[in-house]
Image: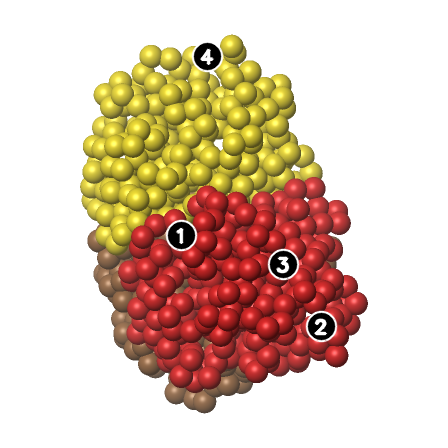
Chain colours: A yellow, B red, C brown
Amino acid sequence: MTYNARSGQLLDALREQPPLVQCITNYVAMNVAANVLLAAGASPAMVHAEEEAAEFAGIAGALTVNIGTVSPGWTGGMLAAARAAARAGKPWVLDPVAHFATAYRRGVAADLLALGPTILRGNASEIIALAGGQSSGQGVDSGDPVEQAEASATALAQRHQMVVAVTGATDFVTDGARAARISGGSRLMPQVTALGCSLTCLVGAFAAVEPDAPFEATVAALAMFAVAGERATDGASGPGSFGWRFLDALAALDGAGLAAGSKIEAA
Amino acid sequence: MTYNARSGQLLDALREQPPLVQCITNYVAMNVAANVLLAAGASPAMVHAEEEAAEFAGIAGALTVNIGTVSPGWTGGMLAAARAAARAGKPWVLDPVAHFATAYRRGVAADLLALGPTILRGNASEIIALAGGQSSGQGVDSGDPVEQAEASATALAQRHQMVVAVTGATDFVTDGARAARISGGSRLMPQVTALGCSLTCLVGAFAAVEPDAPFEATVAALAMFAVAGERATDGASGPGSFGWRFLDALAALDGAGLAAGSKIEAA
Amino acid sequence: MTYNARSGQLLDALREQPPLVQCITNYVAMNVAANVLLAAGASPAMVHAEEEAAEFAGIAGALTVNIGTVSPGWTGGMLAAARAAARAGKPWVLDPVAHFATAYRRGVAADLLALGPTILRGNASEIIALAGGQSSGQGVDSGDPVEQAEASATALAQRHQMVVAVTGATDFVTDGARAARISGGSRLMPQVTALGCSLTCLVGAFAAVEPDAPFEATVAALAMFAVAGERATDGASGPGSFGWRFLDALAALDGAGLAAGSKIEAA
């Protein structure tokens, strides 16, 4: 089956049985990530407290962990939930936002990476820096093109036996053996905050649908974002009008539309 | 006076003297709840720290407490504010989000319920579970229709001498003696995150306007949401375009429009 | 050079080299403030944890601190970041949201003010109360017109050797010697939450562009908000449709448009 057909199939399955996705994400992203999941057809739950995060990870179909606004009160819940998801055989996704910016952030990202995420999603600067390279990121924005991060992504995927997704103008996904590039999206997307963080949550939703195929699930999530982003650009006159059109486009997209509209190529 | 006329009267009173509403709510809902209150005409204040929550409850006209993203750092402020509101004779509203999902959450909800909220608002699964029944909720979404929660709502209202609102396709409100059903709204509302949480804050705003009539205040808030939801559906092509149209519809609605447009029936 | 021309020049400079702005702000404002900065052309980073806030302040071009939803877990990061910014010669902006409402909030605002912010931005009630006057604010909303706060603003600017901006229907900015008034904006702006908090972050962005001219930077940021607010009102039918139009208007505005459209007068 082609990646396009598989992506469409996964979206249909997601809509038929909405997965419960536990998102431990940052304060900036919480609302938009929840809306992205609802529009896509999944059921988001923002549950982070150490007192319940692990218990909830046993109920949810997948977990996503994002360190965008991390603080010591949050790391306990992140680590406990990641451990519980792994124990329960549930996929979990790590989003190491700006992990290279400070010593504290580097430590938190390293602790989480050591727990073996199923999937890692980041921008090019984050992936390059996590692989040990020299990135030119500034704050939370990538300073490097995706192409430059492909070797780092492959190295990380092989080293940690996980799927790695580098997102940007054209996305790159690899499990260390296979790889794919997804194009589409919109030049307006970097002007809307937290879309990358929301994509991490959507990757979790697709991974919950097909826990045994995290590579295909990641490709499908990225393809859905790219197709919806392209469609939302029609009629948008700036980042504000793009934002709500993007949610509409996610909700309007079905499996057939995703299969027909995706631009995925094996790399 | 009919419920419709009374609702219109309460909205006019709210607009004339905007109540200050202290909302202790979750991270996902904060922005949209504040925008809902501003559009409706109230003055929201998100004040949660234990160091000031009780003091502020003495200033505000009403308090709302929502456990959506609760953690130990927050419960102290919630409990202190609820006690202070009760002491000052101010109405307070409890929203026990997904309280059945984890042991921690059940404990927090029970502690707050023991303080005697004026009004309780939840979805059907939350109300059924709080009354001791078997719900089929998944995460924060209800798995049960409102009708199935009516007996639970009545039992809770009588047991705790409070108003209970179960919201969904058709809402049900009871104080244990009287009951009403409110219809309207939009099929798009469950696709937008935190609208239920925002409704809890709006219930607080109406309760602040008429502290001695929490049943009527709750009916009015639910009716306002239902009428605005219905109007916002016109021209909406998905959850994104519904979101901002809903805020416009809330702001455009006045007392006469609410009285004319509400679909409230005694139950 | 006129204030108009200078504002346009600063916006062009901001777009040419996007400043990294560290925003420690409240939960309600985080998403919209980040979107405002992105639309304006800056690079926002919401970094608040005490473990990294000071280190990050050394990287960022400017820091903004807003106490809207402050709690003890946050004050350490605020104070450390403000000290680090001052040490590194970076401008930092204080937004003392509703500091008069509770004893806790008064204390936090006083501690931050004692560290010597470069710029202070508040509504009239906040500025009057901070100067020791009697304000009539309720919660986070101003109960006083800007004109009434001009003397307080001048006194504060002189006492603390900082720029003070009072924002409202017509804004007032002073460094204790010079002063300017900026008009424009929209009657819909007070109906959208967190726009004032977002403006504080935008002031930080302009201050990062021109650290040696905080007065001119503040004027430029306020003028940009006022012009975009005015333009966004066209076609808006309420606070919901205003919100996204405002982001579009910020993104569409360039230096020439800002210079031509600003209504700034020396006071």
How packed mark 2 is, by other alpha carbons closer than 10 Å (few <14, some 14-19, many 20 or more), is many
User: Are tags 1 and 4 found on a single chain?
Assistant: no
Tag in front: 1 or 4: 1
Q: Residues at badges 3 and 4 in contact (C-beta under 8 Å)?
A: no
Q: What element carries label 2?
A: helix
Q: Please name the residue that numbered disc 1 is placed on.
A: B100
| Mark 3: amino acid | Asp
Residue C92, image x and y in percent?
A: 35, 62
Q: Mark 2 lies on which chain?
A: B
A111 versus A182 height, above or below: below
Q: Residue B3 carries which label?
A: 2
The mark nearer the N terminus, 3 or 1, is 1
Q: Distance between the residues labelled 3 and 1?
A: 21 Å
Q: Mark 1 lies on which chain?
A: B
Q: Please name the residue that numbered disc 4 is placed on.
A: A266
Q: Distance between the residues labelled 3 and 4?
A: 50 Å
Of C173 and B146, nearer the camera is B146
